[in-house]
Every structure is written in C-alpha cells, then in structure tokens.
Amino acid sequence: MPTYLLLIPFLPLFSFVFTFLLGKRMGVHSHWVPIATVLASFVSAIYAFFQVKNGHGVNADLYTWITSGEMKFTVGFLLDELTSVMLIVVTSISSLVHVYSVGYMKGEDGYYRFFSFLSLFTFSMLMLVLGNNFLQLFFGWEAVGLSSYLLIGFYYEKVSAADAGKKAFIVNRFGDFGFILGLFLIYATFGTLHYEPIFAQVSQIANQTFTILGMTFNLPTAIALLLFCGAIGKSAQLPLHVWLPDAMEGPTPVSALIHAATMVTAGVFLVARCNPIFELSMTALNVVTIIGSITCLFSATIALTQTDIKRVVAYSTVSQLAYMFIACGVGAYSAGVFHLFTHAYFKALLFLGCGSIILGMHHEQDVKYMGGLKKYMPITYWTFLLASLSISGVPGLAGFFSKDEILAMAYVSPVGAGKFAWFIGTLVAGITAFYSFRLFFLIFHGEFRGTQHQKEHLHESPKVVTIPLICLAIGAVAAGWFGIPAVLGGGAHWGHFLEPVVGHPHVHPSHATEYILMAISVGAGAFGIFLAWLFYLKFPTIPQTIRESFPKLYTLSLNKYFVDEIYGATIIKPFLSMSNNIILKFFDLGIIENIVNGIPKFIGYVSGSIRKVQDGLVSHYLAYMGSGVVVIIIWMYVRA
Amino acid sequence: MTFPILSLLIFFPVLGGILLLGIGKENVKGVKIMALVISLLEFVISLPLWFFFDKTTHHMQFVERHSWIKLFNIEYYLGIDGISVLFVLLSALVTILCVLVSWNSIEIKVKEFFVSLLLLEGAMIGVFCALDFFLFYIFWEAMLIPMFLLIGVWGGPNRIYATTKFFLYTLVGSLLMLVGIITLYMQGGNTFDILALAEQNYPVKLQLILFWAFFAAFAVKVPMWPVHTWLPDAHTEAPAAGSVVLAAILIKMGAYGFLRFSMPILPEATSAMMIPMLVLSLIGIVYGGLICLAQSDLKRLIAYSSVSHMGFVTLGIFALNTQSVEGGILQMINHGVVTGALFLGIGMVYERTHTRKISDYGGLATNMPIFASFFLLFTLASVGLPGTNGFIGELLILLGSFLTRPWVALIAASGLIIGAWYMLWLYQRIFFNPVNARWNGIRELGLREIITFLPMVILIFWIGLYPNSMLDYMHVSVAHLLDQVTGNPAGVTSGVQLGVDAAANVVPHLPQVSH
C-alpha cells in the first residue's frame, strides 16, 4: 500500500481526533490542523490521479477486519480512474470549504467542533470512495451520515436543527435497510464483498433467479435495486428526498460541501461503481431512469416558488442529482460522473455564494428581503452569475457539457425510459435556468427590500470567503473542458479516462442528432433565463398574477407537494400511536402485565378462600369429615 | 495440578466481601477503597485467562474437577471454553466500573452495598465457569440474592414491587429448569457433568420437554418476548450499579444458558424449535424497539431497548450458523459494553438531576459537553454505526440469519431503522434542543467518571475496528457447538455455496424456505 494513498484519508482522521480533543484549547487557531491536513490530502489526491493516469492503480488490503467461518471482510483501498476523480472532487471542495469556513464561522460557539466535524466528514467520504469492497463502502456510507447528522445539528439548541439532523439520519436508514440487504445478497451469491472478484464474475448471474417465501426474483435486478435503495436515501431521490431540504439547517459551508458537492453524490458513485451489476438488469436501469426523471421534475418545480435562498439551491441539488441518475440509468455512467464533477463546483459555488450573501445580510435567508445586492457585493455577484450560467447550461461553461451529454445519451439510449428522461431533462433544463435566474435577479437586481438597518450594514464578505468563491468560479467555468465532446472538436477525454471502470455507453448519437439535441437544450435554457428576466426584472407584477391565477398549483409547490405532511400522517404518527396505544398500553401493560400480576393475585385469592375453611371451629371440621366419609362411601359403592 | 485460577476468581471477591464486613461501619471511605482494590485485583487475576487461553481447541481449559457429593455424583467441576472466557473477563471489568459509579451515589448502608456487589461478582463468574449442572444451578440461584438486595435496598421508590417481580419471575423459570436438570440426571446416566450429558442421545420427545423447561429459565433471563416485563421495572428501580450489572452480565446468562445447555444437550429439539425461537426473537426486536418510541422514562427506554437488542442475540444464536452464532456471542459482549455504558451514564446524570423523565432534560450538551460526547458515542454504538462494536455484532447476526433464512434478516433489519429512531430521538431530547434553565450550573463529569467510561470507549472501538481479537477466541468452540447441534461445523447454511463457480450453474444458493 503506497504511503501517499494512506495519507489521503488518514490525515483528516488525525485532524478530527486532534481537533476534537485539543481544539477547544486552541480556540481561534483550531482551524490550522484541519486546513493543513486537508490540503495535504488534496495534494496527495492529485498525485494519486497522475499515478492512475500513468497506469499505476492500486487495489490492496490493509488488514482483515472481520473473520467468521468462511467469511472474511477486509479494509482495503482501490485506486482506479473513478476513485481518482472522486478523490479530487472531495479534497478540492473540502479544502476550499475549510478555508471559507474560517471566515464564515468566525466567532461562532463550537468553532473547533465545527472544524473537527469537517475533518471527520472528509475522512469518512474518502473512506467511502477509496474502499475496495462493499463493506468499507458501507462504513464510509454510514460515517458520512454521522458527520452529516452532527453538522446539520451543529446549532443543536435550535429544535429545527436538531430535528433536521435526526431526520437526515433516520431517512437514510430507510435507504440503508435496502442497501445492507443488497450486500447480503451479494455475499450470498459471490461469497465475498470485494469489488474485483464480484465484477469479474458478475456476468454469470445474468438472468438467474432465486426464491424467498415462494416468490421468485431476478437476481441482478434484486441486487441492483436493493443497492439503489441506499443510493436513493443518500442522494435524496424520491421518495426519500425529504431530509435534504431540511438539512439546510446546518451552517452553509456544510450545505456546500456535504449536501451539494460530495456526500449526496455518493449514491451516484455507488451506481457508477456497480455498473456491471446494473448493466445486467434492464428493469433496474429503467427504474433508475424513471426515479431520476420524476425526481428531476418534481424538485425543480418546488424550487420555483421557494423564497429561502438555501432551499432553492437545495431543491436544485436534488434535481441535478436526478440528472446524474438519469445518466446512470441510461447506461452513460461516465456522463453521470462528469455531471457529478462539474456540479460539485458550480453547486458548491452557489451555496458558498448564498453563504456570503447571508453574511452580508446578517443571517437573513429570505429572498423577499433582498434585492439590489449587486453593488454591495461585487465578487459574490460575479461568481454567483457564473454559477447560475453554468447550471443553466450556457455553452462553454461546465454545466453545459455535462448536462448535454446526459441528454444526448438519454435520447439515444436503448433503455426504455430513455426518451422520457430526455424529454423531462430538457424541460427541466429550462425550469432550472428559470429558477436559477429568478433567484439571481431577486437577490442582486432591483431595489433592496430589507430593513434600513440591514441596508446600512450590507458589505462584501472578507477575502477568506471571496477567494474560495473565485477558485470555485474557475471550476464552474472550466470543469467541463475535460470532457468536450468530439462533435464540438474536443477529445471526449473524460469518457475515455473512465472507460476502464464504467465501460462504453450503449449507443452513441450521430453528430446531427447531437447538434439538434444541443440546440434544443440550449434553447430551453436560454428561454428559461429570458422568462426569469421578463418576470422578475422587466415586469415584476407577472409572478403575482400567475400566483393568483393558479393558487392551487402555487400552494402545492410552495408546500413541497405536502410530502412531509403525508409522511407525518401515514408513517410517523401511526407508528408512534401504535407504539403507545397498542403495543405499550394494550399489549405490554394490558395483556402481559395483567397475566403476570394476575397469577400471584389468583394464587393469593385461592389460598385466601381456602384459608377460610380452617376457621378453628370443631363443629365445622366434624361436618367436613362427615361429608368426606359420605363421599368416600358413595364412591366405593359406585365403583363396586 | 494446575493453578486453580477459576476457583480463585470465584472466591476471591466472596472472601473480599467477607473481609469488607470487618471494616468499621463509619469508615465509608475505607470501604470504598477496599472494594475498588478488590475489584481491581480480581480483574488482574482474570487477565491470565486472556493471555493463556488456547484458541485452537474447543476443549475446556483451566479445568478443576473434584468430587463433591458422591451420593449423587455431584462434582465441583469448573472450566471455560471460547464461549465463556470473554464473559468471565467482562464480569471482572464491569464490577470495577460498578464500584466506581457507586462512589457517591450510594449513601446508605455503603458497606453492605459493596459486599452484595462482590458476592454477586463471585456468583456470576461461577455461573460462567461451572461445568456441573448442579453446581451451575447453585451459582445461578446464588446470583439472585445479592441482586434482590441491590434493587430492594438501594433502589428507587417502587423498589419492593420491582425486586419481588424480578425474584419471582426468575425463580419460577429456574424451578422449571431444576425439574429439567433432575430429569436429565436420571435419563443421562446419573451424572451432572454437562459435557457428558451432551454426548448422549435423548428421545426427541424428551428433548422437547426439556427444551421448554430450560427455555423457562433462560428466556426469562434474556429476557425474550413475552417474558420480558420484569426487566423495565428492575432497571428503573435499580441503583446505577445494579442496572449496569443487570444489563451487562446478568441478562447474558440466559443467552449463555441456551449456548451451554439447550443447544449441545438437546440438539434435535434445538433444530426443531429453530423457527419458533427465531420468530420470538423477531417479535422481541420489533416490539422492544417500537415500545421504546412510547417511553417517557429514561431508564425504561434503555431497558426496552435491551429487549430489542437481546432479540438480536437470540436471533443469532438460533439462526445456527457460524456467522450468526459468533455474532450473537459478540453481540452479548457488545450489548454488555454499550448498554452497560449507557446505564453508567444515566447513573451519573441521575446523581445530578434526580429525575428520569426525558422531558425534564434538554440542551445538556451545552452544560456537559464531555458527557454529551461520551453519551453520543454510546448512542451510536447502540444503533450499530460501523466502526463501533455494535455494527460488527449486528452485521454478523443479520448476515448469518440471511444465509439461513433471508426473510428473517429482512424483518430483523427493520430493527436498525427503529433503533436509530428511538435512540437519536432520546439523544435529542436530552442533549439537544433549547437548554433547560433548570440545569444551568450542572456539574460536568469529574475525573473519576471519565475514567469509569474509558474502558467502555476503548472496547467500543477495539471491537469495532478489530473484532477478530475477540472472534478468534470463539471460532473453534462455536464450530464444535454447531457440529454438536447440526452435525456441521458451519451450521445451517441451507446449502449456501460461497463463490461463483465458472462451470457451475450459478443459482444464488439461497435457501428455499420450508413451511
């Protein structure tokens, strides 16, 4: 095992332990160790990338974790093309977020705690992507969940923050329920959880079936869909998306790092990593595509009406993750990972931009009280603009290349739901551009709508905040240039690089098709931006008119289709009520306890009754004896 | 003759307890220090078991065998194997922590308290070491008395009800077991030697009767659903040390009983009763978990969570394959560590607040950050987060039962969701949410309390990251046990073939479930 590879995850682990235990004493200097270690990890990750590029991948076990009978699980690292890309995404964004947090979290209680948790997260995420087996993936999977729980609930004295952290953890457990069963099924089939032997032999399970309780299932479909359950939870896809918007209770740097750029993409990583399994099941691919498409549209329509800037970006994240799943579903894994890569930069930038605005606005997050911030926050303004253009798919920027590749692949894919996904994806491209620029115009243009006090204190954020913004802006512009398609004169380097892991897409579109599709999606994006300009700058009364014309639709979107309420009424409340009324009161305290306490009572009652016979009166005893004798005589007589 | 280390382990704390009686009543400090020294020495004496245990054999080790009551062939017969060795060590460790956590919280009859604790320790270790059924029964019943006192004398307001309930519940079960033991003695060639009894064949009908007679004793102790209702009362009323010992060691006796007696002596009955046992375990897991959602009392909640967690243990034991049984045994230790630690923590906080009502708390993380960190770790271990010991046990149990009966694992895995729900909710209501002004100025943990927690923290990570150091002790013994029960050292795998054979027709060899 090469040392540089060990350093990548274990430096942040060291930083976590160190900062958690000693950070309090270091006070305002507690960020130094986390920043230094994450930067070192970043450098190592770049080195690792070039190692892979030069053909020096790694697949080695570190030590044996659990042995029981035939079963042996190890901790080990796999460094291949997919991992090396993920390492760069995680360490680069994490480094920038670390630096940014120095400014953003300044003076907060628990400053050291924040940085130690950031390190813990970085470690966990790196373990997740570096593992060479499913169990270590699961370790990282749960550990990032823990970090997320801790960071969402960072302001734990706020009930909403504590609730949100808990909700994230529990909703994810629903996904993990399927995930772990998927692991068991894999183990039962292959006798190992190591990627390499599994993927090498995976073709043998094609079309195999198995039976549980008389029901027959297709093996690859079952494995793929169980794993996908985990992905749905972690990547906040329908129907387990409900935790992500609430996760915005966490400090904004956390939203950028964990809930936009890295952790939530773990589901996409999982599907891409397991592509040999998904490839065996058309059903699974269709399910992934359809879930992705529905989530994509669903969350984009919610983003249209939200006024909390972080929630808009959160729903946008759900929608963009859905694009990545569409890509995986139609078999274009490298396009999915490409979008993961570009999205990490422009979405982290949007979130950190929001954070900068929130700093400038003194912790106001509602867009209703913003407006005209352009002249007060120029750097935030320009970087935010670049990110918005990028997510809207403006040609030349990062989001354009990755999104267009997904749409093109969906269109030509042999997967049944491909065309449907293309249609939704293109539609949502327009909606995305619209809500992104709605947000942008409402924040930065027009008149300031906040209080006079807020207005007087409006200011650009300090350099420690704006420099990370600028770095990310470079990514939001240029990250796509790694994968310029051949049709635009590029070398499609991205796809070629990842090919050893994720294989070749099923079908390639012809150049003519690609041009047309590109034109349509760019047109959709441009139209979205135009409409946003029309609605929010040119004729600002239009949104009001629309709201009043379609009050039901508006309410539906504003209240996120009432999914939280539905879950509350159909799952949480019935369960709590069942626990309390049926299980505890009726069964445990009612039936079982009454039986348990009833037996001694009954014995007491019987002995109490019998005791009365012994009343000490000789006449009574004589009577008993006499009747006894009579009974015996009669009995003997009858027998004889 | 080898050094009688097991006898020493059993009788050293008993002698220590008697010595303690000699100290003056007013010398409270002396009593405490003496008790601590005895428990520490006991732990030191137990350490050779860890180092000199031979992991390559299933034969009993450190054996002591003397004839005792010749008329009935009753022997003084001690020995340990890979199944019991870790529990002896855990008992010795936990007793130290119990002494530490009782340092200030016990205010009346201090001397008598520590005497009871030490006598209990001796009896507990005796249970794990006894290889003569009669001797076992004596230790088994001997445990009841000090525990009865711990709850009845130093317990909460409703202690008399709780301790009587505890006593009667277990006594009824034990008496049925006694009948079973005597039957076995008469059928098995007039011997109480457990190993000899296990080597004989008994008619299946008799096995089934004996199985349920033993079940009465062991299931109550575990406790399995539906004979669990003594546990919440006992836990709630017991003093901190009582709860810790109860959670960490006493309720493990039931599962140990299944492993040591029911399974090897009654193999056919065990196999035949596999499904009913799995179903009872599943009910325990789900029922115990759901009921936690309805609890408003801190200790009751953790007590019911024990019902759920012990459901996992019995599930593993009765899924009858290597992974599940080893997972079950490991989970017994894990549960002892984690739930023991949770009760230690509750004891510490109760000492400060004198309330067990969850709604009385809130925002404690602000006032007691160190305590909150420890408690968070225990919470996470309890919900089985990877990296902690709880994960290893649950993983092995679930995986093992999946290989035996996939639907069992499917239902049991729902316990992971419910577990996270009630534990994180509990954590939130105590440590998060707005600070309850009532606890402003509450004392943070002192050094003694931090030291009390440390062994548990170390064990949580140790087992979580390197479980093989524990599992290595079990492998051979578990294989032998499974061989006795199922005739196959790997246990019931229902023909699960591991490995995809290039030539073979690769049906995943999942078991077809028989009805």
Image: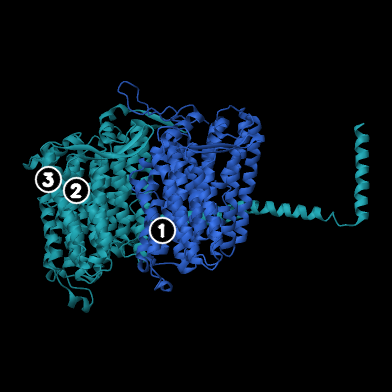
Which mark is in front, 2 or 1? 1
Q: Which residue is mark 3?
A: A47
Q: Which residue is mark 1?
A: B452
Dot 2: element? helix
Q: Label 1 to label 3, Cα distance in Å? A: 45 Å
- What type is the residue that disc 1 sits on? Thr
Residue nearest the observer in this picture, B195 or A527: B195
**Measuring 58% from the left and 27% from the top, which residue is drawn there?**
B200
Dot 1: element? helix
- Vertical side of A239 occupied by B432: above or below: below
Disc 2 with disc 3 on a shared chain: yes
| Residue A84 locus on image (x, y percent) | 17, 43
Q: What colour denotes chain A? A: cyan
Chain that appears blue:
B
**Measuring 53% from the left and 64% from the top, which residue is drawn there?**
B110
| Residue A100 locus on image (x, y percent) | 17, 62
